[in-house]
């Protein structure tokens, strides 16, 4: 059970980022959402059984440098193409949550040659007219926490925690970077949807049925645009299916990865 | 000292009980609460009020820009300024100011200011601001780039006013192939530029720069902070190697005078509390969206907030005792202004005589008394 999670500083060009990894096997690259990296989740731990799980903190988040050259999610995608090349990752599974899902899609419309599969968990990046995403920039801290979950018991646990000064600083840093990347247009790139057909690799879209941040209605559009896609809607679940319903979601993702390995 | 009669033009007929059900009187307050018939009366009363300030001997009358709220009905202050120009003769018209970063093309600000300067034959004073945080919610402009866009838009506007056109402007946020203003401003090289601010160090340093020397107006702050910020500007000017002049120090604040302190407090108290607790009420997420201030200022703000008991509403008494609002007898108000002048070299006072729910009748009596008894002794 007690697996060592290695945390390294990795320099890509002039930007140094914090990268955590554990496990052995084919690499799974997980791209976190706008909330940043919080902890080594049970979801990551479960994946280490068969894979080397690599979880970087994006430039501008947590322990990573902020980078003036990264001003948009497409910039972030270019950064991760360099990251994948620099680390010599030739054959990987890519998983992205929320904003991280958006980054993953932007990577793959550019270059899918080193990636075997895509798993999107409640991804941002495209827009469904008439269904605006939740406004995490106007919600207060309590609303933001509550709106992450279907089961408010999870929110209560988080709300009871008193963050340290360092955690508050990290939260503010993450929030600034998220505004830079996602404020306008709000959480999508008008030029992404029309190229999603280029992601010609097996894809899985996972969504909670009660997502107040990225509405579940977005799942249909992803399903329509991705050429080789499966959809899994987790019941009684908010914006963090890999946390709130990890008992169901984790095996589903594991089975997907196993099923498509060449 | 120069005196500038400033107005926010609040929507007084607001249903406060209904409004209190919403997060703020900004951004999300449903505009079904706005009645255009009552609103038209408000505009008429406020414009008349400002026009009358010319005969009372003020140096300038002043308006500003705010969007999507009940706090100030001037999303387009230039429209009000245009009306004021037609109804006045010699008084200066100060717009303090236009919010530069929230415009997609700042050329329109340069053009409109230039038009107003022509229409008034050089009576225009141009304020440049960034807009308050809430305006990044209501316009959708990214607050992360607010400072960068402000500086770039400023450069574009000043160049458009002063550089022979056509010329290309090649910026990061604004790119215009042909900058060529018709009309050019009436004043040479351009209308005066004033910088209203809540005292951020970045703004002080920028405004005091020898290439600019822009008058720095501290807005709506406690007297102690007003003194501190204005002296920061003076010190900054000295660091730049020059002595700032009287005309570079400004202070905008609500003012109310009556025969006695008690009467002033009784007449203006509810109105000043409405300004702060009803019209200005907004959560931190609206006031300070990420990137609107530097990350360090934001971290400091969070530390302060945990240190001070949060959720305390300002009262008329607390606003009076902190000198945030100057409310009192002629002598009380005069001595407070004189105190700030003596401690800072203050040269421009921008009193706001109507605030919150204050009635036309009280606002008129207030401005009259101020013009008769306070203003002459401080000139």
Image (cartoon, coloured by chain):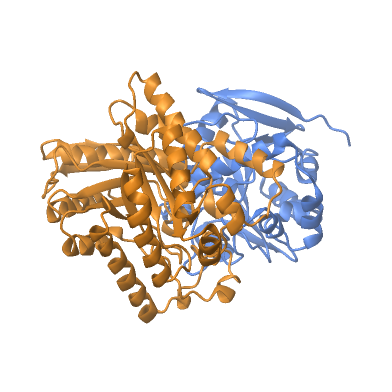
Determine the colour of chain B. Answer: orange
Q: Residue at x 81, y 51 (%)?
A: A160
Q: Is residue B6 left or right of residue A77?
A: left
Q: Residue furthest right?
A: A1
Determine the colour of chain A. Answer: blue
Q: Residue at x 67, y 53 (%)?
A: A141
Q: Which quarter shows the C terminus of chain B?
A: top left
x and y percent of residue B335 in the render? 46, 44
Q: Is residue B161 left or right of residue A14?
A: left
Judging depth in this view, the residue of B151 and B277 nearest the camera is: B277
Examine the image and state in which quarter residue B301 appears: top right
Judging depth in this view, the residue of B55 and B167 nearest the camera is: B55
x and y percent of residue A145 in the render? 70, 55
Examine the image and state in which quarter residue A63 appears: top right
Q: Is residue A37 left or right of residue A194?
A: right
Q: Which quarter shows the N terminus of chain B?
A: top left
Residue B85 visible at all:
yes
Judging depth in this view, the residue of B138 and B303 nearest the camera is: B303
x and y percent of residue A231 in the render? 64, 61
Residue B96 visible at all:
no
Q: Looking at the image, is B67 positioned above or below residue B129?
A: below
């Amino acid at each position: 059970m007690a697996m060592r999670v290695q945390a390294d500083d990795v320099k890509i060009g002039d930007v140094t980022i914090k990268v955590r990894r554990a496990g052995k096997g084919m690499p799974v690259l997980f791209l976190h959402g706008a909330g940043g990296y919080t902890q080594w989740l049970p979801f990551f731990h479960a994946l280490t059984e068969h894979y080397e799980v690599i979880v970087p903190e994006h430039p501008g988040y947590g322990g990573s440098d902020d980078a003036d050259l990264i001003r948009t999610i497409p910039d972030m995608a270019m950064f991760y193409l360099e990251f994948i090349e620099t680390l010599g990752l030739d054959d990987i599974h890519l998983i992205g949550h929320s904003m991280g899902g958006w980054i993953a899609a932007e990577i793959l419309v550019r270059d899918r040659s080193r990636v075997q599969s895509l798993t999107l968990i409640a991804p941002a990046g495209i827009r469904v007219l008439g269904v605006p995403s939740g406004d995490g920039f106007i919600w207060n801290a309590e609303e933001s926490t509550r709106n992450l979950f279907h089961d408010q018991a999870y929110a209560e646990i988080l709300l009871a925690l008193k963050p340290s000064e360092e955690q508050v600083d990290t939260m503010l840093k993450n929030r600034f970077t998220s505004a830079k990347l996602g404020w306008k247009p709000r959480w999508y790139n008008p030029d992404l949807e029309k190229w999603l057909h280029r992601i010609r690799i097996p894809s899985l879209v996972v969504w909670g049925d009660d997502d107040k941040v990225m509405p579940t209605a977005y799942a249909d559009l992803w399903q329509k645009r991705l050429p080789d896609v499966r959809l899994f809607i987790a019941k009684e679940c908010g914006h963090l299916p890999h946390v709130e319903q990890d008992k169901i979601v984790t095996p589903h993702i594991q089975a997907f990865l196993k099923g498509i390995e060449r | 000292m120069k005196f500038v009669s400033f107005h926010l033009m609040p929507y007084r007929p607001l249903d406060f009980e209904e409004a209190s059900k919403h997060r703020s009187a900004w951004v999300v307050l449903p505009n079904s609460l706005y009645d255009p018939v009552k609103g038209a009366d408000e505009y008429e009363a406020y414009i008349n009020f400002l026009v009358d300030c010319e005969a009372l001997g003020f140096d300038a009358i002043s308006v500003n820009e705010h969007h999507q709220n009940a706090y100030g009905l001037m999303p387009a202050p230039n429209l009000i300024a245009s009306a004021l120009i037609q109804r006045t003769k010699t008084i200066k018209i100060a717009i303090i100011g236009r919010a530069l970063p929230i415009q997609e093309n700042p050329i329109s600000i340069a053009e409109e200011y230039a038009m107003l300067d022509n229409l008034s034959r050089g009576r225009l004073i141009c304020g440049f601001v960034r807009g308050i945080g809430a305006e990044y919610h209501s316009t959708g402009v990214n607050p992360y780039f607010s400072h960068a866009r402000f500086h770039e838009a400023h450069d574009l506007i000043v160049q458009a006013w002063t550089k022979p056109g056509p010329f290309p402007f090649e910026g990061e946020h604004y790119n215009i192939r042909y900058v060529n203003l018709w009309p050019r401003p009436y004043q040479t090289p351009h209308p005066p530029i004033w910088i209203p601010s809540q005292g951020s160090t970045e703004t002080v340093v920028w405004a005091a720069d020898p290439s600019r020397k822009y008058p720095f107006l501290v807005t709506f702050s406690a007297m102690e902070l007003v003194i501190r910020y204005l002296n920061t500007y003076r010190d900054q000017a000295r660091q730049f190697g020059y002595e700032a002049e009287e005309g570079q120090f400004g202070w905008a604040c609500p003012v109310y005078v009556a025969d006695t302190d008690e009467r002033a407090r009784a007449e203006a108290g509810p109105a000043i509390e409405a300004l702060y607790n009803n019209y200005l009420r907004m959560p931190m997420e609206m006031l300070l969206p990420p990137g609107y201030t530097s990350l360090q200022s934001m971290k400091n703000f969070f530390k302060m907030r945990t240190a001070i008991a949060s959720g305390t509403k300002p009262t008329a008494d607390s606003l009076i005792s902190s000198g945030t609002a100057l409310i009192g007898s002629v002598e009380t108000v005069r001595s407070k202004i004189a105190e700030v002048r003596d401690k800072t070299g203050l040269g421009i006072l921008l009193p706001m005589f109507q605030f919150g729910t204050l009635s036309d009748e009280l606002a008129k009596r207030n401005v009259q008394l101020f013009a008769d008894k306070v203003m002459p002794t401080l000139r």
